[in-house]
Image (cartoon, rainbow, N blue to C red):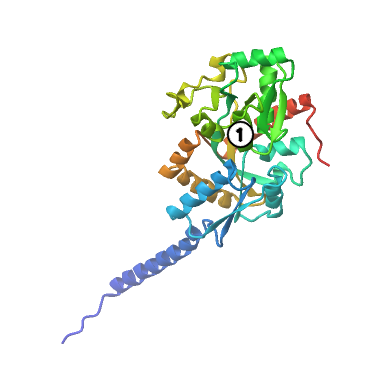
Amino acid sequence: MTHRTAAPDAVSRFRASRRLLLLGGGAALLARPALAQAWQPARPVEFIVAAGPGGGTDQFARIVQSIIQKHNLMRTPVIVTNKGGGAGTEAFVYGRGAAGDPHKVVFGTNNVWLMPLVTRVGYGLSDLRPVASMAADEFILWTHTDAPFRTAKDLVEAARERQGAFRMGGSQARDTDHILTKLIERATGVTFTYVPFRSGGEVAVQLAGGHVDANTNNPAENIGQWRAGRVRPLCVFNTQRLTLPEKVHNGVGWSDIPTATEAGIGPAEFRMPRTVWLPARTTDAQAQFWTQLLARVRETPEWKAWLESGSQGDLWQTGAELAEFIRRDEATNREHFREYGWLVEQG
């Protein structure tokens, strides 16, 4: 059998092409670690809730956790812990102590930046890194069904006649309900006696029993009493009516509630954002991971159903948009708190 030998130029071309192939393969191998370096959690993640069990912030964190697990959006498990002491500041102090750890994710509201304005706390806004705002709680002006006023304007006039004796219930002092009450006073020129309770649920019971004259609860907090015919809504503090089609009591539903502007009172809009934070000194890649994961969460039917069940609005903000929202809201409230005599200087 005759053995053929390749011509010298063919051998050279073969060797050259082999070198290129090896170099290409090496480049591909070098590229793989770069792709694998996109950050992902390496151990169990802790969702820290700036509230006690069962409240709106707790429900917020737990629906995100359940969606992540149901849809396998992350390889590591998620546990939820409640740190609601000090109106939620316990969670933010805990976040401060976890600086640089992207496995600690804090769930709160606008209380993250408002609490340091009105009380001495063990953290500053720079100790946490905003990731996203995912939803906004609506606020409704409610009264009990035995009250003589039928509209928001009637309520304001009744409060004006009582000269400060009108009782407005709310959850905690110098918190969201109290802030909204002060804004209503500012817009209408009336004065309320603000009566703080421990939670929105407790406020709902007190209003249904006629122990206070009104409250500014979220829809989910008063819906049970509305269904039972013990309270009625007067207006929603949004520029648009709520769109949920459900009829709650006597053929009246969420979309039938007039806006504050339609009702002839102010402020025109007041909504509480549901926010997610990382500790400071986490990296851009780590923050991007959580932003992208939360974006996937909000696309699921379970998330949309949760928004509807609580009559909450969609408020998706990240990055520079969220940072600017926080800056403006903090500055506005700082001026209001100074006017109310609430502003404190951190020591």
**Residue 305: image location, x then y, percent:** 44, 40
Looking at the picture, tell me which residue is in the foreground, 205 or 50: 205
Residue 241 lies, in percent from the top left, at: 49, 23
| Residue at (74% x, 39% y) in the render | 116
x and y, in percent, of residue 198 in the image: 68, 39
Q: Which residue is mark 1?
A: 205
Q: Is residue 192 left or right of residue 208?
A: right
Q: Residue furthest right?
A: 347
Query: What residue appears at the point 51 percent right and 48 percent down from the top-left corner?
Result: 64
Nearer the observer, 21 or 52: 52
| Near-viewer residue (8 or 229) | 229
Q: Quadrant of the C terminus?
A: top right
In this picture, residue 160 sits left or right of residue 344:
left
Q: Quadrant of residue 230?
A: top right
Quadrant in the picture for the N terminus: bottom left
Picture coordinates of residue 294 (x, y %)? 50, 46
Let me know if residue 189 appears in the view.
Answer: no
Q: Secondary structure at mark 1?
A: helix
Q: Residue 319 is drawn in which quadrant? A: top right
Task: Please say whether residue 113 is visible from this viewpoint.
Answer: yes
Q: Which amino acid type corresponds to the residue marked 1 in the rendered image?
A: Val
At horizontal 70% and vertical 33% (from top left) the residue drawn is 196
Residue 300 against residue 335 in the figure, above or below:
below
Above or below residue 333? Residue 320 is: below
